[in-house]
C-alpha cells in the first residue's frame, strides 16, 4: 500500500510559512496583520504535523504509533518555531519595536 501525496500538498506548509513572514513584515504595524501572521504560523505548524504523520511509515503496534506521532509533533513544533523566528525577524527589521 503505497500512498503518494500530490506535490501541491507538500507546498502548503511552505506557502503558509512564507505568507506568515510577509504578513508580519508588511502588515506588522496593524492588528489585522499581527493576527493573520499568527494564524498562518499556527497553520504552517499544523500542516507540517499532518503531512509528517501521513508520510511516516505506518507500522502495527501502539509503540510504533506513539513514536510516529511524537516525531510528527516534534517536526510540527520545529516548523512552527522556525516560522515564528523568521516572521519575528522580519517584523523586527521592518518596525524596530525595541529601539
Image (cartoon, rainbow, N blue to C red):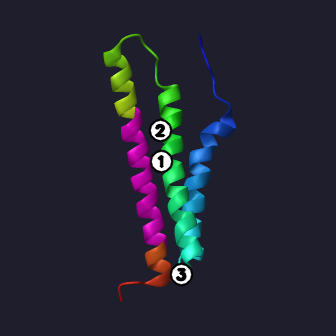
- Residue under the point 36% across and 32% down: 71
Q: Position of residue 92 (x, y in %)?
A: 43, 77
Q: Which residues are magenta?
A: 72-90
Q: Is residue 42 above or below residue 88?
A: above
Which label was assigned to residue 29? 3
Q: Give the structural element (helix, strand or loop) at label 1.
A: helix
Prevailing SS of the magenta stretch: helix
Instruction: Give the spatial CA distance, label 3 vs label 1.
Output: 23 Å
Q: Give the structural element (helix, strand or loop) at label 2.
A: helix
- Residue under the point 59% across and 73% down: 32
Disc 1 + disc 2, Cβ < 8 Å: yes
Q: Is residue 32 left or right of residue 77?
A: right
* Disc 1: which residue: 45
Q: Is residue 62 above or below residue 38?
A: above
Q: Is residue 23 above or below residue 13?
A: below
- Residue under the point 43% across and 70% down: 89
Camera-nearest residue between 23 and 11: 23
Which label was assigned to residue 49? 2
Q: Give the structural element (helix, strand or loop) at label 3.
A: loop
Disc 3 + disc 2, Cβ < 8 Å: no
Instruction: Give the spatial CA distance, label 1 vs label 2.
Output: 6 Å
Of callouts 3 and 1, which one flags the residue occurring earlier in the amino acid sequence?
A: 3
Residue furthest bottom in the image: 99
Amino acid at each position: 500500500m503505497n500512498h503518494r501525496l500530490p506535490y501541491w500538498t507538500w507546498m502548503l506548509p511552505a506557502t503558509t510559512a512564507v505568507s506568515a513572514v510577509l504578513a508580519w513584515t508588511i502588515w506588522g504595524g496593524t492588528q489585522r496583520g499581527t493576527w493573520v501572521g499568527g494564524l498562518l504560523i499556527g497553520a504552517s505548524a499544523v500542516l507540517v504535523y499532518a503531512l509528517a504523520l501521513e508520510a511516516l511509515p505506518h507500522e502495527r503496534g501502539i509503540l510504533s504509533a506513539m513514536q510516529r506521532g511524537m516525531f510528527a509533533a516534534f517536526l510540527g513544533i520545529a516548523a512552527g518555531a522556525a516560522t515564528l523566528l523568521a516572521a519575528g525577524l522580519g517584523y523586527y527589521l521592518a518596525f524596530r519595536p525595541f529601539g
